[in-house]
Image: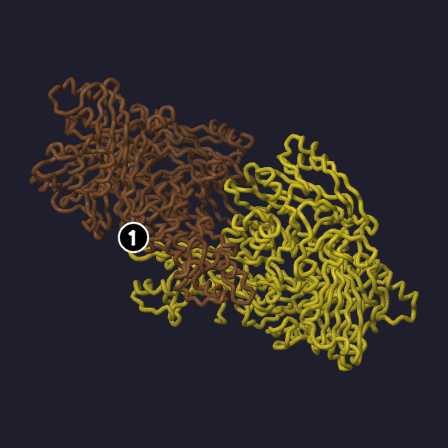
Chain colours: A brown, B yellow
Amino acid sequence: MSERLSYVGKRLARPDIAAKVTGRAVYTADVALPGLLQGRILGSPHPHAKIGNIDTTRARALPGVVAVITHADVPSDKFTRSTLAEAMPDFAFAGERLDQTILTSRARYVGDWVAAVAAEDIYVAEKALALIEVEYEPLPAVFDPRAALRPDAPLVHDDAPGNVAQRMEFPFNAGDTAQALAEADVTVEFFGVSSRQKHIHLETDAAVAWFDADGRLTVISPSQGPHLAKRQVARRIFRDIDESKIHWISPAIGGGFGARLALGVEPAAIALARAAGRPVRVTTTREEDFSGYSSRTDHHQTVRLGAKSDGTLTAIDYRIVADSGAYFSHSGSTTAVNIQMTLGTFQVPNRYGQFTIAYTNTPTTSGFRGYGNAEGAFVLQQAIDILAEKLDIDPVEIRLKNIQKSGDPSCLPPVPVEHTRLDECLRRGAERFGWTEKWCGWGRCKTGRHRRGVGVSAITHSSGAGGFLLETSNASIKLGADGSASLFVSPCEMGQGILGALTQVAAESSGLSREAIHVVTGDTDITPFDLGSHASRSMLVVGNAVADAGAKIKHQIRERAVPLFALRQIKAEPSEIEVREGRVFLFDRQDVGFDLRDVAEAAIFNFADRSEQIAATGAYSAHSHHPNHQAAFAEVEVDTHTGAVKVIEYLAAHDIGRAINPQLVEGQIEGGAIQGLGFALTEDFVIDPDTGVVLSNSLQTYRVPTANDIPEVETILVEDPYAGGPFGAKGVGEAGIVNPAPAIANAIYDAIGVRMTSLPMSADKILYLLAEREKKSGVAPGASAVSGQSI
Amino acid sequence: MSERLSYVGKRLARPDIAAKVTGRAVYTADVALPGLLQGRILGSPHPHAKIGNIDTTRARALPGVVAVITHADVPSDKFTRSTLAEAMPDFAFAGERLDQTILTSRARYVGDWVAAVAAEDIYVAEKALALIEVEYEPLPAVFDPRAALRPDAPLVHDDAPGNVAQRMEFPFNAGDTAQALAEADVTVEFFGVSSRQKHIHLETDAAVAWFDADGRLTVISPSQGPHLAKRQVARRIFRDIDESKIHWISPAIGGGFGARLALGVEPAAIALARAAGRPVRVTTTREEDFSGYSSRTDHHQTVRLGAKSDGTLTAIDYRIVADSGAYFSHSGSTTAVNIQMTLGTFQVPNRYGQFTIAYTNTPTTSGFRGYGNAEGAFVLQQAIDILAEKLDIDPVEIRLKNIQKSGDPSCLPPVPVEHTRLDECLRRGAERFGWTEKWCGWGRCKTGRHRRGVGVSAITHSSGAGGFLLETSNASIKLGADGSASLFVSPCEMGQGILGALTQVAAESSGLSREAIHVVTGDTDITPFDLGSHASRSMLVVGNAVADAGAKIKHQIRERAVPLFALRQIKAEPSEIEVREGRVFLFDRQDVGFDLRDVAEAAIFNFADRSEQIAATGAYSAHSHHPNHQAAFAEVEVDTHTGAVKVIEYLAAHDIGRAINPQLVEGQIEGGAIQGLGFALTEDFVIDPDTGVVLSNSLQTYRVPTANDIPEVETILVEDPYAGGPFGAKGVGEAGIVNPAPAIANAIYDAIGVRMTSLPMSADKILYLLAEREKKSGVAPGASAVSGQSI
């Protein structure tokens, strides 16, 4: 690999940005089509109810209404919303559960889909919804996963006894954890609950669908994985539509964060398009997004750690009760990833993980950036601090002692931990943060109303889900006579800037000028197969495919340049020719060369000889999860009178391998940190425990961080090129959201001496804990100070 | 080449047909875009006028008007409308002439473009046109090319002295034609004029254009060659737009016939989009289409033949005066092709061709199916009959004696005539037609009011313009996990069915099932480089590229099938594996195999090993014009009282090499024959000789053949696979339109003994000629009975 890099490592502007900042990017809601109808969906007002007769007469009679459908009009095959399930081998340990239909004959949460309408405009569609008369027979409902697992709980699904959606032991458990815990010098047990964070993609869900005259189906939607979505629709939902007759387009996507890894309104749009015989766009409101089918899965997590007196971990036991909501979707895989990451952060010889997922009469949960890891880190990283406190070891030191090292056996055998610089992240982060200066030892120095504290968290995350599910990508490049090139990739650009980074890889590997590269993406007819964006995979997996295609393009350019050098009376072998930044020249005489456009033009406009466009396809498959790592440091100030937590400073050091575009990497880390701050402190998804109604159903009642809430986020890119990544790159998309909650929780503990066991760590909870501590004076601030979902 | 063919040779339905017959295909006029404006163009009411002040104040003030532009707002660089000019090498013998701007400061024909408007809707745009106040200073005008070439004629372009747009001798003239004519046993001279046939594409011209936020230009238009059009716009018209920033899409095209080889309203749409800062669609009416920039070029042609007494041709001298109309466009290349084809039909050792193209103050002419050949054949095929009559040789026999044979030197050296079965076309056609029975020798047997006659014509045409301009194509195929494949090609489907035929070639060459192949086409960002549709090229040139890609796909499938056979305990080398009709099996044990979908799925959903999508790109370059040939026979009945000509029977035998889809080949021949019938008999483009106004400006005043006018057209496909074509195929798109006029002219002569010298051969002309013959009794029916455009 050449170390002289032209584009890799540069802070170059993303190609998608101009359209987005000027409002000219075309999102699903902007798509214009002749004869396009507007579709809307009717949700159940009951959390649990049998549905009797549905009278659509009045709705159908409304002028402008073209189709009204109910459960009787949609396929009866059950499916899962999880698009990623299609990429899992049959032996996947977090298998799918097929448990829902497009429209239901039994409402299982408030908002569950009962009917849908397609009409000439959105106003008529809304009016028609109100005219549909549904007979509901209410059933008893359950809203809490632990309550749902009790024997007397009402059944959400008749074929899920005890409301158990899935129960599983981690297949790569190792050693004898019970014995190791019994033999440990010191043990810690900690319980914590994560919240149902909402993705808050600015674009609420929408889909356009229509059938061509020859029966071919086109779907336009903000899917994070159109190739898999197409497969899913054909194999799981509309089994009478052959997959080869489906065409899926992802246009501009207004944020994903994992939500678009599950199907949203697409199946309803397809069913309406079929019923109406015309194109239909289904849209949703922000309220429906909240009371719908997509949030982080809440995990009720208990971790037990065993260690030697020097702080060396010997055992970890990790158990989760998760709440899938009304339908399964991603809850299985997020919970499995939680276990994988939680057991895989530290090198522990004896490890045990298991989980139980319960159905409840609440909105369906789904995959969310961090994908279980953000949930698990909240408890694991507090538990390790509790252990450190017991042993009076510095929190940075105990992490450095126990984190996995390159070459260590990973928790996903057989591939070892291939490359980690988490140690360097911890060291450089601590130094820049001033850890030693700020840390005064377990909160003992804090007094007064406003108390500051510092906390650390150090995590691992994957760069793609290789070893867990199919991880593969393909990329094509074609070079036009004008010297411009199309790069065909399908990672799904949902705001992360991946398309820009991929053009840098394409330009670097091919020698094309980066300005010459235009990206074609998100269309299953056109773009080569790719899984889409998830698991921080795109840079490593898609990037490797792009680098493969780029290298082939460079090879072709070199060969085609030989006769052009000859025309200039220069004899050159392909191996003597370099291609860089849109210029072709001799390795040893860089002034001798010409514009790459000459090669591109001669390849096609070749009047004398064979003309042949320069084009190539590259591919890559991952069979490991190529971990990336991040350490983060937070300083907070807690107002002990109000309970308010202010983050003073936040610093994340990321083990990126190589930053293809440092600006985009920093953007991912900062964006993740801010979204993680919301997860940590303010974002509170509230379900009425009596009615199952989502109370936090707007951006006024559900508080995402604003500019006022967020500190300057500092980032350190720890760069040590990883041989398995394109130009050394590893992933970054998710790690940033994992650390904030535990780092802040540890900092809060440092500030005020109470352990936070549920998210968000809101002011009311802090005040409550401080008051409780006052009451039970004598309770040492520390392990298991409080526990339970009630906080 | 395997002779066991699964798809080639089959009458399979075209993939584009369902959308077209149901009205669901999206044409340029159907494209919907957010914020799309409607554009209209103001034409000059004067045939020749200087344009003074243009006051757009009132138009701009009209609510809803977003932009009004005039010549001051468009690039001043002059260009040619001919898109094909971009594919000509600098040494092309029919070079381009850059003589027009988007909007003009001097009107050169009635309808010449003076201003353009973009408005919120079409009604406002129309209204705004009427509010533009233009000061015209009328200039003297000239409407006839021979008048235009006189020294005293008004100059259409100041830089074209004598109104000579181009004057040229054919570069491959041979021998000493003057001497050979002087020494010939017998000579013939014949003069004939072709008409300005209109393409009558059902879709009138339209274009959509917009600039993205980052300045990238997208154009949607029914271009027959989007890759070249993009090049043309950047290199010739908007020189401030880099070609790499242009994206051109050809959606469904409502007929081309050569008209779309020239730019239409695209530059105006681009200029309006730039001025308006929004997407603009410019549309045209049928009236504007007639008085616009696109019809066949009228050729005034004189041919002299010299022959031995046995009928062997010894010399041909061929001279054309052509009328380009107000601007040059395709007139040079169509006239050059006329000479090429006319000199290349028969094997004549001494040949001389030259042409002069004149500017006139009439609408611009352009390329039209047949592209000069239909014009030339009208005189050559009558001249050869006149010669035959002089020597009393059967018209079929004299053609058989003189037509070029495989291996003969062609008139486009150095490549000889590679393959022709024109002799077989003549023989089989004559036999099926019953020539011997119907032919009674030079009209001598005809009496009575209704007289029947028969005529023959035998022509050559090219399969692509290799040797004349760049002829190259590229094609890509990608195979999805579901077994479906995208075929990326860009030949432009304008109704001819080429996409269907190409899927047959793709399926045959790759082994994929044809139903699995979906075509992606007509988008310069996406489809590999191709020139577009012209010169009957697509089947041979694009087809060869597709076959190349298909063979590569089959190779990959064979290699990937090896481990799948191994899983089934069968050891097989790639060379032992056949792929056909979507099935993979052993050559020698055809029952042992599996569905190709298994290979496609395993290539991508390969959890254990490297997964890599099956994909390939193929290419082809032509350096000869690969001639195809056709002989046609017509029987007519002339009503000597009314002059009406009824075609009783029409039979065309085509030298196709191999018919990839016989139904489509027949469709091309039949469609060509019917369009040729209109050219021959009814389609009359009339310009008022005093005002320059086009009088035939609707389908009521310009009569295309209807179902009542056309006989059953019989076709014979003479199949003898040509090694240079995909599965042996040669072209067919144009030949069908070339023969009708001369075959009918010869049949009319056989019926009533008068020679037709101008097109169309309308009833009034026939009555006039019959009356003239009565008057000048004693004039032998035969050579040069009448001449001149006045008929």
The residue beneath circle 1 is: A724
Residue shown at 64%/53% (left/top)? B262
Q: Position of residue A607 (x, y in %)?
A: 56, 65
Residue at 85% over, 68% down: B785
Q: Label 1: state its secondary structure.
A: loop
User: Compared with residue B39, is residue B743 higher up or lower down, i.e. above or below?
Assistant: below
Q: Where is A9 relative to A388, above or below? A: below
Residue A257: where, in percent of width, then height? 35, 38
Return the residue nearer the eye: A591 or B164. Answer: A591
Q: Quadrant of residue A352?
A: top left
Q: Position of residue B776 (x, y in %)?
A: 92, 67
Q: Is residue A11 left or right of residue A191?
A: right
Which is more toward the observer, A108 or B207? Answer: B207
Tell me the kind of residue under disc 1: Gly
The quarter of the displayed image where residue A258 is located:
top left
Whether residue A553 appears in this view of the structure is no
For residue B169, side relative to residue A633 (left or right): right
Placement of the C terminus of chain B among the 4 image quadrants: bottom right
